[in-house]
Amino acid sequence: MGKTIVGLELTEESVRAAEITVSRNPQVIACGEVPLPPDAAKDSEVLDSGTVAVALRQLWTGARFKSRDVVLGVASRRILVREYTTQAMRPDLLREALPYQVQDLLPVPASQAVLDFFPLGQDGDRVSGLLVAAVSETVEQIIATLGKVKLRARGVDLTAFGLARATARLSDPGQTVATVFIGDHTTQVVVSRGGVPQFVRILPLDVPTMASLRQSPVTMDAVAVLESSLELVPPTTRARSGLRAAASHHPIVSDLAARVRSTLAFFAGRPGAAPIEQVFVTGAGVSVPGVMETLTTVIDAPLRSVSVEEIVGVRAVQTTGDLALNLVSTVGIALGEVR
């Protein structure tokens, strides 16, 4: 067995990880997910370090991960991602200058933020790219929690970048594609070309996935009804099966579709923006009745739902249901270590 790396995500509902081989043809050799009790975490934020540490220990034991080196994916609604243009300079000098340049753009003092700049292009002495800013305390809390169970954070990556990486394996290098990850409480939209992100939006939106329903104050009968309806068709095609009436039970579906549509329209309306040729949709929200059908009616580009088996090979592990959809982002994070 060659070298491996583990992609790790922390959500409000669970801790989720996938271990892949670092090779030309990476494969998932282990994966798993452990549910979290309410108020233990929010998306990419630790609220109860002890509880999260226990879940991580259970995850590593249950999934039998061989590596303790992880790449952490973050996707909190508190993360700022925006286009930014600055003076071209050496990367080390830019890192030093960035906190002073972007202070007015940040929701917290620059000294309390983790900053990154992803360059996309240069025009003369000006360089344009994506500015990413996260609250440093949030990242430090997660890393400290990993240390409690002897896990080593090799890096921290924006989950949207992992999504671009993952779906690049399904598209031509010259294609401009959008990837929409519909999670329990955040929906991520990333437009990319050849795996290079051009545009990112993180939309705070509570979606009635099975995981979020289990933590919400709905009756177990309501959960059982939704579960039984979803068992009729495979997870990656169930939302295409004409369940238009089911969508009316969850008004959030229309809101989700409208926000995704307006996000893609905003990108398309920018000067020089390339037309989006394909939209990939993944995450547990794909399984919510009416989601794929409604997105198909409001988005002009071809839509395709994606599960992890379409991204990389899966060896000796089972990825079914919502886990197969959610692991697309988890694996995408780990793919950043594959050269």
Image (cartoon, rainbow, N blue to C red):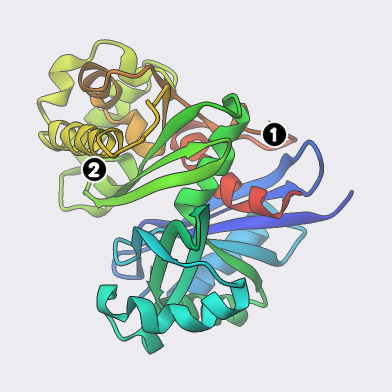
Pointers 1 and 2 in contact (C-beta within 8 Å)? no
Tell me where residue 231 appears, x and y as whole percent: 38, 22
Q: Amino acid at mark 2?
A: Val
Q: Which mark is residue 102?
A: none
Label 1 crowd bin: few (<14), some (14–19), many (20+), radius 10 Å: some
Label 2 crowd bin: few (<14), some (14–19), many (20+), radius 10 Å: many
- Return the residue found at the far top: 242
Q: Which tag, 1 or 2, sits closer to the chain's start?
A: 2
Residue placed under numbered mark 1 in the picture: 314
Q: Which mark is residue 207?
A: 2
Q: Is residue 238 above or below residue 18?
A: above
- At horizontal 67% and vertical 34% (from top left) the residue drawn is 312
Q: Is residue 236 above or below residue 219?
A: above
Residue 316, by quadrant, is top right
Tell me where residue 132 appears, x and y as whole percent: 42, 65
- At horizontal 22% and vertical 15% (from top left) the residue drawn is 243
Tell me where residue 317 appears, x and y as whole percent: 68, 37
- Return the residue found at the far bottom: 111
**Residue at disc 2, secondary structure:** loop
Residue 99, by quadrant, is bottom left
**Residue at disc 1, secondary structure:** strand
- At horizontal 22% and vertical 32% (from top left) the residue drawn is 261
Relative placement, left or right, of 170 versus 321 is: right
Front in this rendered view, residue 105 or 42: 105
Q: Amino acid at mark 1?
A: Val
Relative placement, left or right, of 192 versus 270 is: right
Front in this rendered view, residue 43 or 41: 43
Q: Is residue 4 above or below residue 179?
A: below
Q: Is residue 287 visible?
A: yes
